[in-house]
Amino acid sequence: MYFEPKYECMNREDLEHLKLERLQAALTRISKNVPYYRKKFDELGIDPYDFDSLEDLSKLPVTARSDLATHAPYGLFAVPLREVVRLHGNYGLMGRSIVVGYTINDIHRWSRLSARILMAGGVGKDDVIQVAYNYGLSTSGFGMHYGAEEIGATVVPASSGNTSRQISIIQDYNVTTLVCIPSYALYLADRLDELGVNINALSLRTGLFGEEAWSEETRQEIQDRLKITAADTYALSEVMGPGVAGECLERNGMHINEDHFLPEVIDPHTLQPVEPGQPGELVITTLTKEALPLIRFRTGDLTRLIYDPCPCGRTFVRMQRITGRCDDMLTIQGVNVFPEQISLIISNIQGKTPRYQIVLERQGRLDKATVLVEADVLVPDKIKEQQRFIENIKQRLAMELGVFFQVRLVELGSMAFDGDRLIPVVDKRTF
Amino acid sequence: MLVLKNIDVFYGKVHAVKKVSLHVEQGEIVALIGGNGAGKTTLLSTISGLIKCGRGQIHFQGNQIDRHKPDRIVRAGISQVPERRLVFKPLSVEDNLLLGSYHRYSFGKSASIEQDVEEIFAMFPVLGQRRKQLAGTLSGGEQQMLSIGRALMAKPRLLLLDEPGMGLAPAVAQMIFRHVSKLRDELGVTVLLVEQNARSALKISDRGYVLETGRVMVQGTSRELMQNNDVQRAYLGRDQEAVTREPVSP
């Protein structure tokens, strides 16, 4: 089942032309409307109008997350703010949050692209979809919601958390499709078992999962235990949110919506394109976004592109499931966090800079994040003051990063060292 | 159906069209909008072979046509309705139409051509009433119909329409635009439409390209273009003050 077969199954030759056409128009518009890019083109001596083929793309400069943060909030927007009908964002980098804007056209396009992904993953008009992603500043909840409505499916905006409520919704609303982060799907499976719910009596039949790295084994487990087909999706709030790429029912790589997002894979160190099909960092150029167009945005995600034709009939190139990061970004409970954000918060509290270590573990199915903070430097032996200090850090982390951390004061000796060097992040999770 | 790739057109030293790529699919109405001197008419004339492009390729139904002579391009199925209509004023309405089928004319074909003339008169009854009248005596709207009728006589698969609403009273222009939709819906003719009146053009078209100083600036479905800030500001004459967002009612 296709949502827009005209594009999803377009022959490669026409698709290449369409991409070139859109890229040329996008570059003209970007260099006219975004001073940052215009300046950058001038500096590098690039004529944005001199584009004969998609191969010329590698001449253009890359855009990093830090560029977005530096020009936050609206510096890279290509339309005046009055044209922006929606802002999403994440919890920031270098003390500034990254803000992503959408015009009304962007929102409509977002809906259609998410609809494609949902349909590729097996969702149809007759499905009842429980969206258990967080609805808020992050894009996942809204993106999937709009996509499902665009198809004409029935949406239950359950949002995240409150597991017993989620379970009663699955049972009472005859939910057929579950959309959430994969670890939460397994957590739900555990809880359903504990409650003695007969999985076969549920109406669940499909699921689309994303937002965090997961493995084939996890997929197998989700499929076996919830008795559903589980498709992988790829979302990126800076680029759009859900709707960038998703698996078809072949479940062998995610089709990138190539008519709107131009993928490249580069070597993260040399920034040169790798040979087709080789692994590297995924870089995306948006072809149709109006409010925040991005040229060669470095996603930080490691993957490789699969050019072989897919039996499902879609001609879009596929990306393999994400195998890792080429920067130090952490994904905790589905939220992206950079260690430096944590460092900024801790050093801001009470004006002192204690040493600390981040420890990530799996507690049952879910991520458990702990920050160990060096004890002796700052805290005199006063229990009340210690507790207030811990609470303070906890609150700041939860508020500014959207992740709940445990905070413990420990002696330096009980943290993990690599020789003399304190290891900043200890990730004990397995996927 | 029609694919333009990296088209550059020069008038002497003037670079009128710069690296334009676009495509038109079978059965679509595609609008090309933009201000004076944006290169819209130049682009149409390049497709019909009246002007040669400096660089780039034009493919029509799989065949490369950018080096073909205009008559061969007409035979391939592309007819242009020129700007300012350019009917042959001293000739009668009927003769104007017959000239449109000039390349089809050969011994024994006249019956089918006669029939085509009658079809044009059925589509534009007012032309039928004036079949013997000199074209120069027709009103602007009637001349536009005649110009379109003349192009249709070549039995085109793709019609290039250059500013069909120019110089016409708004109501007459609207009627012409309605006819353009009918051409697609009833005859299955694909249309590439150049128009300064962006609103009317976007209303009847499926997709559009906005040209600015010879470059494609924005492309998308007509519905998207109507909502696009750049298009609204430059071509839809939006009153910046009138559209400030209404406060949300509680």
Image: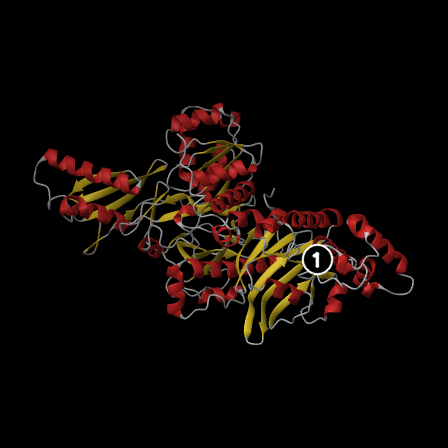
Q: Is residue B95 left or right of residue A41?
A: right
Q: Is residue B60 left or right of residue A261?
A: right
Furthest-right residue in this view: B108
Which residue is rendered at x = 56% and y = 64% of the image? B37
- Eyeballing the image, is A189 above or below A1? above
Q: Nearer the viewer, residue A170 or A235?
A: A235
Dot 1: element: strand
Which residue is rendered at x = 35% and y = 37% of the image? A366
Displayed quadrant of residue B72: bottom right
Give residue B114's position: percent from left, percent from top: 87, 56
Amino acid type, residue under disc 1 in the picture: Leu
Which residue is rendered at x = 7% and y = 40% of the image? A380
Give residue A382's position: percent from left, percent from top: 8, 36
Give residue A41's position: percent from left, percent from top: 41, 66
- Eyeballing the image, is A221 above or below B41? above
Give residue B192's position: percent from left, percent from top: 65, 56
- Residue B156 visible? The answer is no
Q: Nearer the viewer, residue B143 or A48?
A: B143
Residue ID for mark 1: B159
Quarter of the image with the N terminus of chain A is top right
Q: Nearer the viewer, residue B141 or A245?
A: B141
**How many C-alpha atoms fall within 10 Å of the one at disc 1: few (<14), some, or many (≥20)?**
many
Quarter of the image with the C terminus of chain A is top left
Chain letter belonging to callout 1: B
- Residue A99 visible? The answer is yes
